[in-house]
Image (cartoon, rainbow, N blue to C red):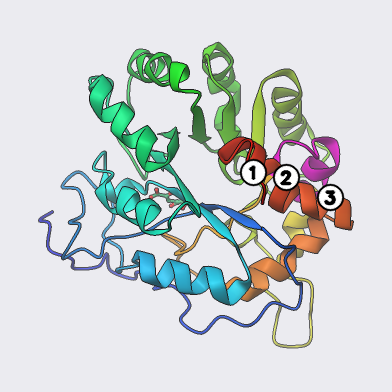
Amino acid sequence: MDTASTKTPGWLDWYSNPSKPRFQLPEGAVDSHCHVFGPGAEFPFAPERKYTPCDAGKEQLFALRDHLGISRNVIVQATCHGADNSAMVDAVQAAGGRARGVATVRPDISDAELQRLDTAGVRGVRFNFLKRLVNAAPQEELAKIARRIAPLGWHVVIYFEGEDLEDLEGFFGSLPTPLVVDHMGRPDVTKPANGPEFNRFLRFVENNDVWVKVSCPERLSVSGPPALDGETAPYRDVVAFGRTVVEKFPDRVLWGTDWPHPNLTDHMPDDGLLVDYIPQVATTTELQHKLLVTNPMNLYWPGENA
Ligand code: 0GY
């Protein structure tokens, strides 16, 4: 693949005209999982990438933030940029204190570069275990990265499929930093939320220093967004999973849009609807405030007021 920005065939671009959410986010709400893609002409995509996205730059992210009533963003390095964190760091710095970053780094990164990323606002690294997104990295390499970043007070964001937790949880438990799980560990929502697979995930969260993003109903859902026939509950088959996590671990949950929604193939979500999904999983004002403000502030802006 060359570095020219020819999008992956069938690529769905982000939704250009999101609705105004009916659910009003609390003051100081944080989108704890979003990305920037390029723009490719300024920040070329990585040669080793598994997909080539549309452009989705910082101005567009900040416009969505303001439209939805979000105050701050946590910008997670997308795999299409490999370990070149330039686009993400540029966006974090442009946000003037209102964004933090999660980077992808190699084990041989220099101390000076780690320090530079920290100063820029990076607070974690991401380990990705989805074969369609990255070539598998040896666990010893990942463990070395975790040992390098632990003294900075950073955490490790982990992205894996629910069915792979059994094989990975021993490794995860050995890491020396807090862990932040993307998209509830991608449960299979056709299985019960109180069944053995999700119970394994809940035990893993219970027994480790783990935070959970109750994000991506649009990616996990089989029932999908509301039908045009008047169905109003968005992504209803994911709700039991999200609500269980929020109610069991109210002080360790985070929420994010996942804008610009890489690799979706059947529909592109209306980001306003993703905000309207929140009160289904966080059903009280107190739970909503923890999910959207207190928890992400504690993790990404400790000591600062929202
Ligand atoms: C997500 C999900 C995906 C992709 C990435 O970095 C990425 O490429 O995170 C996915 O394809 O499931 O969190 O955005």
Badge 1 element: helix
Q: Position of residue 129 (x, y in %)?
A: 43, 33
Q: Which mark is residue 191?
A: none
Magenta: main secondary structure: helix
Q: Residue at x 36, y 14 (%)?
A: 144
Q: Is mark 3 within 8 Å of ligand 1?
A: no
Evaluate if marks 1 and 2 touch, with contact meaning CB atoms under 8 Å apart.
yes
- Identify residue for label 3: 287
User: Which amino acid type is marked by label 1?
Assistant: Met
Sequence-first disc among 1 and 3: 3
Indicate whether residue 243 is drawn in magenta: yes
- Identify residue for label 1: 297
Would you call the spot at circle 2 few (<14 residues within 10 Å), some (14-19), or many (20 or more)? many
Q: Quadrant of the N terminus?
A: bottom left
Q: Which mark is residue 294?
A: 2
User: What range is drawn magenta here?
Assistant: 241-253
63 up-or-down from 203: above or below:
below
- Which numbered mark, 1 or 3, is in the foreground of this view? 1
119 up-or-down from 227: above or below:
above
Quarter where residue 276 is shown:
bottom right
Badge 3 element: helix
